[in-house]
Image: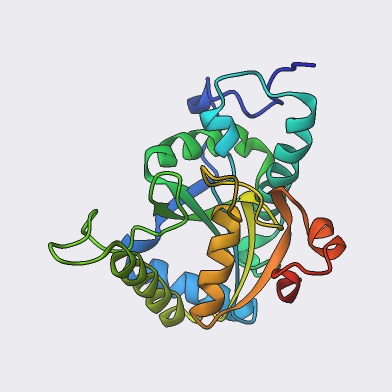
Amino acid sequence: MDIRFPEGFDESGAEKVKDKLTFVDFFQMSEPEKALFRERVKQSNGAVQVFMHPFYEVHNSGEPITLKDLTRVNRVNDGVNGALSTGNTQGDKPPLIIMEEQSNLEKTKRLLIKRQQNYIQNDVVMVPTGEGKSIPRALPERQPRPGQSSNDFIRENWQEFFRQLKDLGVTAVIIGGSFFWADGRGGNKDGTGTGCVGSAMKSFDEGGFKVQISDFTNPDSRERVLADEKSDFKKYL
């Protein structure tokens, strides 16, 4: 059964709504923006909400979303809406960070602007990532330096991101988004992998942050982790 995207997923007419959202580039924050973000982190006891590639299927689907897909997509969609529709700027919830592919940053901004009549005034902190990868683009370089391995390049980008997060007082990450395979059955060409969300969880953990799986992951949910006695992700529940 094929159906249309739900209301808000159509990017047309984005400019018709008065702006309530302010988009902040994490790696280009001004000192006043850092001070505000640091205060909000303090109010949330060091925690931030992170959504990894939350609208990936919306941006990249060449086909209408099926009813089965819609359930998964809406789980993440509900999480983003919840983060922006409550008193986020008053410290009622941890501040929101969206990690989005560089090529989809503007699409995500337009999509959120389209829906913002349902939101309160909010800052949305954006972190660009590589294409189809969870790796933050924290460094000016887009490719490894001559003689530098890909693994070292990836590690340096994560380390710089972590350094800046810690400087802003972040100690804990509640993460959701796309994609997450709790049993490592998908994502890679060989049919293995935990997805960008799964790999990011492990990176944040190795970086010294307390990590928690949010209720808003796609396609697998917290329930899938709970049901799998051998899951490596149980420690993040």
Q: Position of residue 100 (x, y in %)?
A: 47, 48
Q: Is residue 4 above or below residue 206?
A: above
Q: Position of residue 21 (x, y in %)?
A: 52, 46
Q: Is residue 100 visible?
A: yes
Q: Is residue 150 left or right of residue 34?
A: left
Q: Residue at x 79, y 36 (%)?
A: 71
Residue at the far left: name it.
146
Q: How is the image coloured?
A: rainbow
> Which quadrant, please, contains the N terminus?
top right
Q: Is residue 174 above or below residue 114?
A: below
Looking at this view, is 99 or 63 the one in front? 63
Q: Residue at x 38, y 38 (%)?
A: 103
Q: Is residue 15 above or below residue 123?
A: above
Q: Is residue 186 above or below residue 166?
A: above
> Residue 156, located in which quarter of the rendered image?
bottom left
Count up the numbered dots. Answer: 0
Q: Residue at x 30, y 70 (%)?
A: 152
> Residue 137, located in which quarter of the rendered image?
bottom left
Q: Position of residue 166 (x, y in %)?
A: 45, 81
Q: Position of residue 157 (x, y in %)?
A: 34, 67
Q: Residue at x 56, y 80 (%)?
A: 209
Q: Is residue 231 left or right of residue 140?
A: right
> Residue 90, located in which quarter of the rendered image?
bottom right
> Which quadrant, please, contains the C terminus?
bottom right
